[in-house]
Amino acid sequence: QVQLVESGGGLVQPGGSLRLSCAGSGSIRSTSAMGWYRQAPGKQRELVAIIFSGGSTNYADSVKGRFTVSRDNAKNTVYLQMNSLKPEDTAVYYCNVPAGLGPVRPWGQGTQVTVSS
């Protein structure tokens, strides 16, 4: 079964950038889509970006124009480039197959992103 491991989070000032990685211990190249989610304290987990097997992408309005999702099938890795970060982007970020687009994998530990001056 695919294990998902997120990394790359940290503390960054507003306006800064981070690049998150999601590595799959098994093959994720066969998935039809992979998504990046985030969960802020006291809030529900939300889907912020999707990348489909053909390379097309969708983004939540809150991150459109600032975040870019990409995938390297050879490395079984999905990335999330986050630019122009805002305090409201503070959350734990996770990757997984979006519900309805394939079997959801067991959730990883996520990676904490904190945007603060």
Image (cartoon, rainbow, N blue to C red):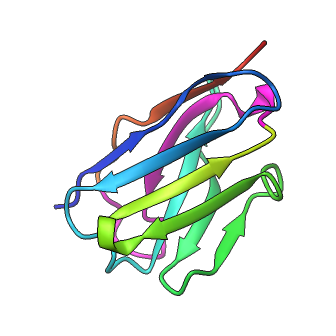
Residue 100 horizontal/vertical position (percent): 48, 73
The N terminus lies in quadrant: bottom left
Q: Is residue 45 visible?
A: no
Residue 54 among magenta residues: no
Q: Nearer the viewer, residue 107 or 8?
A: 8
Residue farthest to the left?
A: 1
**Residue 10 is drawn in which quadrant?**
top right
Number of dots carrying numbers: 0
Find the magenta span and give its range: 85-105
Q: Is residue 3 left or right of residue 93?
A: left
Q: Nearer the viewer, residue 14 or 101?
A: 14
Residue farthest to the bottom?
A: 54
Residue 23 horizontal/vertical position (percent): 33, 53
Q: Is residue 28 left or right of residue 57?
A: left
Please, is residue 80 above or below residue 76 in the view? above
Residue farthest to the top?
A: 117
Residue lying at 61% horizontally and 30% vertically, measured from the top left: 91
**Residue 78 is drawn in which quadrant?**
bottom left
Residue lying at 77% horizontally and 35% vertically, measured from the top left: 85
Q: Is residue 26 left or right of residue 5?
A: left
The C terminus lies in quadrant: top right
Please, is residue 28 above or below residue 6 in the view? below
Residue 16 horizontal/vertical position (percent): 75, 32
